[in-house]
Amino acid sequence: MADVKPIMQDHKNCILKFKGDFLMGESRPTLESLTTELPRDLTGLSCDAAGMGAWDSTLLTLLMGLQDYGQEKGLIFDVGNMPEGVQRLLNLARAIPERPGTRRAVSKDSLTVRTGKATLKVWNETVDMVSFIGETSQSFGRLLQGKARFRKSDLWVHMEACGPGSLGIITVISLLVGAILAFVGAVQLSMFGAEVFVANLVGLGMVMEMGALMTGIILAGRTGAAFAAQLGTMQVNEEIDALKTMGIPPVDNLVLPRMLALIFMSPLLIIYANTVGMIGGAIVGVFYLNIPPQVFFVRTFEYVTPWLMAQGMIKGCSFGLLVAYSGCLRGMQCGRSASEVGNAATRAVVTSLLLIVIADAIWTFLFILMG
């Protein structure tokens, strides 16, 4: 353990005794702790390195800080007793003075400037999102005309990744959400002896809201981030530039099959999530509330009408489209470094979740207006 102990020769001069190894990662005193121990009326400061062991740049940094402290306080700082290598490096570091104006001045923007920058950022982000909507719309138009160019095998690969590849996490989440809905409903309904209505609550909650919402969130964290990372890596490797050079529209070849895969798989995943959620609620209803299985499922399917199921399907399909859009948008916006790929994946998840919540609120309001 490194240590520096100040020893006063007289009331005006002080010797700093260095002991131990001054190496990076080792515990050592800081410049602030040393200067606070020194008297304010010193005129001379010297070093004693007799007990010092190994050293690296951390020692040089400490000594340069002490030199600056000495210049500021107007005292003489003597490093003559330090090792010769330390003295040479200190002299070399001080040999060429810092050029005036090279150090960047740190200034804080005013509130007006920060507001303007934030406004421009939001405006540019909106323009990029609208432009990408236009590009994908044109791509879907070419698809309907039979002119879109992408490999059919890519579509099947993405459908497999989005659909069967997501069944495991959707099973666990939906089962637990259905069970939680049943538990929460049982706490209140048992006060009135109406535990049987837990079946209605689970069916309504899963079909109208939770099945579609949880599926969208899972796809945002799993599939949307994967889309952004894949397209971002292609940006880094300049594969997208190669497609443009060969005259192949990247939106048709890369974005379109991914969006189609989520559009096709989202309804199936929502139906699966609704079914598993009802099973989770039934497990709680049968084994915790002692509701007969036939009664639970009969009440569930009597209450869940086709219109309620359609509401959840409409929400879920829009969620899947938004997840695909967000993931592809952030992937195509990715920069040219590895860190930008990670940022693209993070931004894809954040954008997906934000759009899902907004779309859910809009659909709910519209369905309320429709009765």
Image: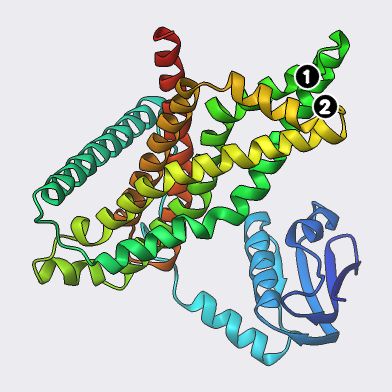
- Structural crowding at the residue carrying mark 1, measured as other residues with C-alpha within 10 Å and reported as few (<14), some (14–19) or many (≥20): some
Residue type, numbered disc 2: Ile
Whether tag 2 and tag 1 are in contact, CB under 8 A, the answer is yes
Q: Is residue 325 left or right of residue 146?
A: right
Residue highlighted by disc 1: 196
**What kind of residue is marked 1?**
Val
Quadrant (top left, top right, bottom left, bottom right) of the N terminus: bottom right
Q: Is residue 173 above or below residue 308?
A: below
Residue 89, x across and y down, in percent: 59, 84
Query: Which comes before the other along the chain, label 2 or label 1?
Result: 1
Task: Tell me which corner region of the image, top left, top right, bottom left or bottom right, holds residue 13.
Answer: bottom right
Q: Residue at x 68, y 29 (%)?
A: 297
Estimate the spatial distance between the alpha carbons at disc 2 and disc 1, rounded to whole Å: 7 Å
Query: Where 70 falls versus 46 (above or below)?
Result: above
Residue 337 lies left or right of residue 203; in this view the side is: left
Residue position for label 2: 291
Residue 240, how many percent across, how many down? 23, 66
Residue 202 percent coordinates (x, y): 67, 27
Is 118 left or right of 162, judged from the image as shown? left
Tell me which corner region of the image, top left, top right, bottom left or bottom right, holds residue 132: top left
Question: Compared with residue 297, is residue 233 higher up or lower down, i.e. above or below?
Answer: below
Residue at 78%, 74% (x, y): give it.
Answer: 46
Q: Of helix, strand and loop, which one carries label 2?
A: loop
Q: Secondary structure at mark 1?
A: helix
Residue at 64% x, 85% y is: 87
- Quadrant of the image occupied by residue 35: bottom right
Observer-nearest of 189 and 303: 303
